[in-house]
Amino acid sequence: MEGLVKTDVPEGLPLVLASGSPRRAQLLRAAGYTFTIDPASDDAECGVCSRETAPELVARYAYRKAESVLPRYRHADRPAMILAADTVASCNGQILGKPADESHAAEMLALLSGRRHDVYTGVCLWSSPDSRCIVDVVRTELQMQPLDPAMIRDYLATHLWDGKAGGFGYQDGNDWIAVVDGGSESNVVGLPMERLKELLENFSSSAETIDTTGPGSPASR
């Protein structure tokens, strides 16, 4: 997979992945990053606004995931660069997150069959020592071949759909899904490594300071 190139974390901060996703961890390891895993709280992925677009949703979830982990690294003796991400698929205006069960996964695959659709990943980097944060969203367009009922049944039987946005994994070796126009493959897997490198390299000049002292902030919880 292209784009798996490592860069330095600003100020030499330890990198913390605020996600339990084995796929995101695999991408970081393949690129050569050293990091620890500290998953965000489950309630970071709750609440969907009726008019929220897929890019808005993943940006908000990525921010909330990083925010939920931040209080654990606010002490001077435990600084960190927190990395959080969220990924969804979107087809015909319908947002497709992780399937609830096999039947739900089958519905998603039937919807995507023969269609182009988008995968969006929101990425949040949050420096705990100075509470500086940056959020970005990466889009990759995919084309799925028509899937007959037997193909869907066979894939569901592998259980590889479990925990994957849209009910499928690009990395599962399926020849019925292709990235369009040279989009980011790692973005489809769950973490756009090319963009992550750029965000880390430009963090000092692009990140914004977040007030964490007001009511409802991580520091006040």
Image (cartoon, rainbow, N blue to C red):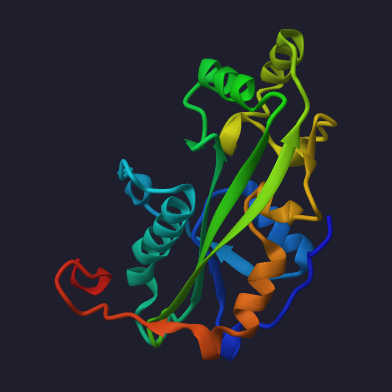
Residue 220 drawn at (x, y percent): 18, 71
In the image, residue 53 sits, relative to residue 169, either above or below, namely below
Q: Is residue 149 visible?
A: yes
Instruction: Say which of 77 and 40 sits in front.
Output: 40
In the image, residue 168 sits, relative to residue 128, either above or below, namely above
Q: Residue at x 57, y 54 (%)?
A: 121
In the image, residue 133 sits, relative to residue 99, either above or below, namely below
Instruction: Say which of 58 and 84 sits in front.
Output: 58
* In this picture, residue 187 sits left or right of residue 21: right
* In this picture, residue 6 sits left or right of residue 55: right
Q: Residue at x 43, y 48 (%)?
A: 53
Residue 54 drawn at (x, y percent): 47, 48
Residue 77 drawn at (x, y percent): 41, 85
Q: Residue furthest top?
A: 150
- Residue 132 in which image quadrant: bottom left
Residue 200 drawn at (x, y percent): 61, 79
- Residue 146 in which image quadrant: top right
Instruction: Say which of 38 and 167 sits in front.
Output: 167
In the image, residue 89 sits, relative to residue 113, either above or below, namely below
Q: Residue at x 47, y 53 (%)?
A: 58
Q: Residue at x 67, y 51 (%)?
A: 140
Looking at the rendered structure, the number of numbered marks drawn on it comes to: 0
